[in-house]
Image (cartoon, helix red, strand yellow):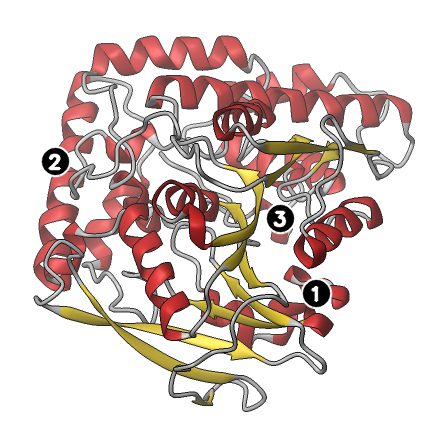
């Protein structure tokens, strides 16, 4: 079943040359943090019918001590909260380096269908049926389709019309409405992980309204579901190979000297939960190599928890058509995935399983990015990032044309705040629009 590691760091900044807000949102102190201001923005449920039903987009703003601009955080996920990222001091500190927080007011929002922005509502018992192991027979495959259909019908009935308008094109329109409401001529966009899809859609539709854009840990929206699965599996295997090299060379690894591949093979032979790939690979995305070793050893711990509920991924089904619509096709794809990842057997983030019988229409299906008028954009990615593979970042950078790909040569999901090198390049670009030379690399931190 689908496993998703939710990480975030997607942002939009207004540079010092942007217009001052002429019509700011009606800010009030946030209930969770009085030092942060909160408000709502009334937006159309369906942007093709702006006079129709509306919903309230929840927004939060954390002021800088001496701001030179505004940073609008676009949450990743899908399903994570940009309001929480701005109001929660711990999350905020992990996401935004002091250099950014000191110089930019930071604005976050909950995307449509998430948390405070007309959340998708579903029966929890029906959702729990989706947490079954991957289908092993035609009968189990049919049960998966039935479970997805039941969840879809229930969520639509409980949520209302917004349930059919969750794709990233609509979210990009919401971002531009927020820009207008803030009175800004342009935005500097900083997007991480799934939020980079919103950034890509914004670049297609509103290129003149971008001052700068950073796409960090890039989700490749240009490939079909089969290629996405194989690419993710290959990236997971590459990260696992880095883990093996660390264990081979470091006595800090609790498995140092052991036949790790054999141990992992034994674990998969006895695994019936379908969660083992996630439990092994997810720590490598942090990266937390000792936690991956603990999973392989069978030691309990907070890093060995079961995968999170799959429900938020339904936002993604609106952005993705799944081509694997039969059990035979699923089995064939599973063979290709396991060939690409012989040790870890797959990726921690498998979209296809949940979008076989999607409850929402795929209104923004996968396709190459078309943004010829977008300004120069920074694409930044870790070389070994299972949730958002490096080769996906390469493809997106090539499609943008005027983009510069910055490579962090180490492990981890999200690179912009990873080292002094990456932080410095991002900050310089956001402040004065200066991109580094093509082919720029930042050295990896030592593995530990």
| Residue 385 is at least partly visible in this image | no
Marker disc for residue 146: 2
Q: Provide the secondary structure element on which disc 3 rests.
A: helix
Foreground: 84 or 399? 399
User: Is residue 136 toward the left or the right of residue 160 in the image?
Assistant: right
- Per the model, the C-alpha gap separating discs 3 and 2 is 32 Å
Q: How many marks?
A: 3
Residue 273, given in percent of the width and then of the height, sits at: 41, 33
Q: Where 29 sits versus 289, above or below?
A: below
Residue 231, given in percent of the width and then of the height, sits at: 49, 20
> Which residue is the site of mark 3?
303
Quadrant of the frame with the N terminus: top left
Q: Closer to the camera: disc 1 or disc 2?
A: 1
Task: State if disc 2 and disc 1 touch (CB < 8 Å).
Answer: no
- Per the model, the C-alpha gap separating discs 1 and 2 is 47 Å
Q: Residue at 47% of width from left, 58% of height from top? A: 74
User: Is residue 97 toward the left or the right of residue 77 in the image?
Assistant: right
Marker disc for residue 100: 1
Q: Provide the secondary structure element on which disc 2 rests.
A: helix
Return the disc, 3 or 1, that comes first in the chain's sequence: 1
Q: Provide the secondary structure element on which disc 1 rests.
A: helix
Foreground: 252 or 225? 225
- Per the model, the C-alpha gap separating discs 3 and 1 is 30 Å
Residue 135, given in percent of the width and then of the height, sits at: 28, 24
User: Is residue 157 toward the left or the right of residue 392 in the image?
Assistant: left
Quadrant of the frame with the C terminus: top right
């Amino acid at each position: 079943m689908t496993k998703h590691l939710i990480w975030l760091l997607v942002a939009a900044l207004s540079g010092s040359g942007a217009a001052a807000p002429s019509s700011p949102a009606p800010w009030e102190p946030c209930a969770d943090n009085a030092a942060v201001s909160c408000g709502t923005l009334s937006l159309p449920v369906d942007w093709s019918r702006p006079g129709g039903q509306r919903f309230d987009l929840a927004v939060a703003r954390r002021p800088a001590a001496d701001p030179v601009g505004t940073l609008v955080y676009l949450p990743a996920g899908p399903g994570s909260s940009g309001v929480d990222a701005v109001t929660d001091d711990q999350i905020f500190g992990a996401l935004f380096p002091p250099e950014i927080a000191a110089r930019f007011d930071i604005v976050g929002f909950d995307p449509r269908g998430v948390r405070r922005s007309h959340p998708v509502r579903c029966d929890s018992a029906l959702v729990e049926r989706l947490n079954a192991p991957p289908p092993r027979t035609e009968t189990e495959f049919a049960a998966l389709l039935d479970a997805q259909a039941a969840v879809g019908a229930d969520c639509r009935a409980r949520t209302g019309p917004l349930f059919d308008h969750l794709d990233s094109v609509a979210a990009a329109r919401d971002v531009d409405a927020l820009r207008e409401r803030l009175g800004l001529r342009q935005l500097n966009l900083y997007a991480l992980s799934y939020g980079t899809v919103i950034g890509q859609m914004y670049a297609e539709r509103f290129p003149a309204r971008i001052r700068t854009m950073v796409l960090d840990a890039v989700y490749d929206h240009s490939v079909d579901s089969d290629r996405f699965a194989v690419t993710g599996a290959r990236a997971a295997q590459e990260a696992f190979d880095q883990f093996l090299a660390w264990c081979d060379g470091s006595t800090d690894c609790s498995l140092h000297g052991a036949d790790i591949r054999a141990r992992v093979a034994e674990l998969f032979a006895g695994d019936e939960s379908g969660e083992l790939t996630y439990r092994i690979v997810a720590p490598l995305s942090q990266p937390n190599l000792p936690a991956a070793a603990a999973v392989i050893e069978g030691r309990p711990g907070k890093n060995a928890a079961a995968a999170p509920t799959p429900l938020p991924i339904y936002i993604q089904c609106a952005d993705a058509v799944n081509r694997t619509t039969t059990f035979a096709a699923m089995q064939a794809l599973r063979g290709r995935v396991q060939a690409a990842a012989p040790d870890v057997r797959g990726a921690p983030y498998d979209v296809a399983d949940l979008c076989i019988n999607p409850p929402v229409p795929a209104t923004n299906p996968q396709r190459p990015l078309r943004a010829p008028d977008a300004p120069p954009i920074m694409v930044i990615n870790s070389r070994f990032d299972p949730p958002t593979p490096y080769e996906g970042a390469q493809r997106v950078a090539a499609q943008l044309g005027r983009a510069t790909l910055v490579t962090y040569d180490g492990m981890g999901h999200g690179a912009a705040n990873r080292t002094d090198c990456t932080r410095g390049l991002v900050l310089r670009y956001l402040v004065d629009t200066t991109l580094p030379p093509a082919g720029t690399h930042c050295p990896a931190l030592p593995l530990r």
